[in-house]
Image (cartoon, rainbow, N blue to C red):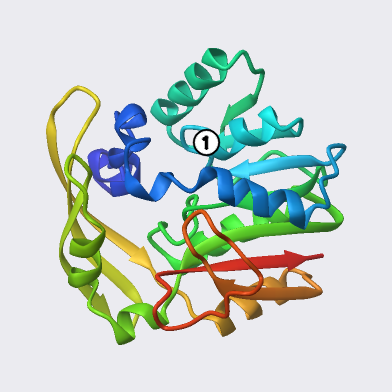
Amino acid sequence: MKNENSIMKKQWYEMLFENYGKKYDSENFTHGTTGECDFIEKEINFDKSLKILDVGCGTGRHAIELTKRGYHVTGIDLSESQLKRAREKAKESDLIVDFQRHDARNLPFNGEFDIAIMLCEGGFSLMETDEMNFEILKNVTKSLKPHAKFIFTTTNGFFPLCNSLDEFYVSTAEEGNSVCKNNTFDLMTFRGNSIVEFEDDDGNKETLACNERYYVPCEITWLLKSLGYKTIDIFGAKLGAFSREDKLTTKDFEMLVIGSL
């Protein structure tokens, strides 16, 4: 019989976002919201009648920005701390945004949305098994209408093969933000392991052992094809400047995926 404590043990991504709503918005990787929403608008031809699902919405930065622009957005996240901050930010901007707490591996929606976005990993690639990551893709797809579009970013498996993760995190570090140390990459599983040091919203210093899956384009293409996507386009993901003109290279830490049903 399994120990109850082991069954209830929280995963690193749950612990990271337990009390990190305010600090999260100061991280440098959150500063591309405006440009990323510009790209999303172009992809949906500025059609404000479309219903958008923001998966792993975090503190609501994309959901809030798109709502400001007149779109109807539902944001879901596993972290109550992140959602609390998202609701506070929406209220501060006099906006009504539908933020709901859900696990992306088990979404309650069926054919309700015209487009789904899942940016800055948004849960996908953070799960502890490939099967769990696939459940996220499957559940998001189940939430979409026929002929809908799914736009997401995920880590690029070519990057750690050709670049030093330690050097990358040092080059992107900013004072007061989280720090990734002792980075390793497993060729057999395509998983990166790291020690993340950060300060939570109460000023407590925290350290977590993190594990994240890196993907290569052919894997993503196969996974999406198995879910019925008719077209799958993959590009390099430049922070705040997504573009179909950016061919994916080994220098891109993330890739931008656009799938159409």
- Give how far across and how far down residue 89 sits, in percent: 50, 21
**Which sits in the foreground, 236 or 113?**
236
Residue at 44 percent across and 74 percent down: it is 156
Residue at 50 percent across and 57 percent down: it is 124
Instruction: Assign the C terminus to one quadrant of the image.
Output: bottom right
Quadrant assignment, res 195 = bottom left
- Give how far across and how far down residue 16 sits, in percent: 29, 41
- 249 w.r.t. 177: above or below: below
* In-image side of 252 versus 234 (left or right): left
Total numbered labels placed on residues in the image: 1
Residue at 31 percent across and 79 percent down: it is 160
* In-image side of 206 versus 254 (left or right): left
Is residue 102 visible to us here? no
- Give how far across and how far down residue 188 sits, in percent: 32, 85
Is residue 192 visible to us here? yes
Instruction: Specify the amino acid type for callout 1.
Output: Arg
Quadrant assignment, res 125 = bottom left
Residue at 33 percent across and 72 percent down: it is 191
Tag 1, which secondary structure?
A: helix
- 230 w.r.t. 171: above or below: below
Residue under pointer 1: 61
Please rate how many residues cluster around mark 1, counting C-alpha atoms within 10 Å: few if below 14, some from 14 to 19, many from 20: many
- 29 w.r.t. 261: above or below: above
- 259 w.r.t. 195: above or below: below
- Give how far across and how far down residue 194 sits, in percent: 20, 62
Quadrant assignment, res 224 = bottom right
* In-image side of 11 versus 252 (left or right): left
